Image (cartoon, rainbow, N blue to C red):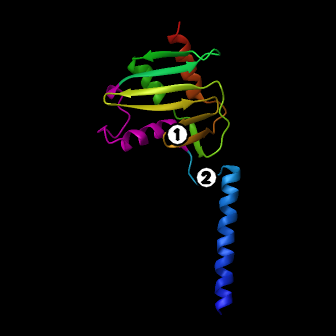
Amino acid sequence: MKNSKLGIFRNIFLGLLIILLIKNIFGLTFSLPTTFKDLIVEDIVENEQLVITSLDTERIANIKIATYTETGARIEVEIEDKDLIHTLLSNEVRLYRTSKFMSSENEYDLYIHFYGTTHRYFIGEDYIRGKRGDYKVLDDHNEVYESVMKLFKEGSK
């Protein structure tokens, strides 16, 4: 009786260990897909300095988009147009949280400056990184990346 209980415990332990190894090797997570807008709203709600519960662009001072040139120089563009900010941050691109992804050199830093705090996101061609983790874009095209790239090019003219 004692050996069978020990065997069951050992099998459960080994099964959990195998699941954990597979999860880490392949970068699997058990999270549900979300959207870029939901990700931002969750960060807003979680921030104790902000006393808002939704995406209120009137509480956003500006956004900054930054990237680095081939020589390592940092270029930054500031956008204060509330309509452009709302359009960008309301994007419904679908995301899936992952623990492994390939970052690219074609990445933009997106800073959202609220009155009182700043949120930072890294926007790549097929991923978005933030303080909650790394997210792979599930859609064919990362509309957030395309919008950020367009705003950056227009702002740096």
Image quadrant assignment for residue 128: top right
Residue 62 percent location from the top left of the image: 39, 21
User: To which residue does mark 2 refer?
Assistant: 29
Name the residue: 52% across, 39% down: 35
What is the residue that sits farthest to the top in this orientation? 157
Image quadrant assignment for residue 1: bottom right
N-term mark: 2 or 1: 2
User: For this view, does 128 lie left or right of residue 17?
Assistant: left
Cα separation between marks 2 and 1? 16 Å
Name the residue: 66% across, 53% down: 24
Name the residue: 38% across, 34% down: 55
For marks 2 and 1, give the one nearer the viewer: 2
* Highlighted range, magenta: 34-60
Pick whichever, 5 or 80, lies toward us: 5
Q: Which mark is residue 60?
A: none
Residue 56 percent location from the top left of the image: 35, 31
Name the residue: 40% across, 17% down: 81
Residue 71 percent location from the top left of the image: 63, 14
User: To which residue does mark 1 refer?
Assistant: 35
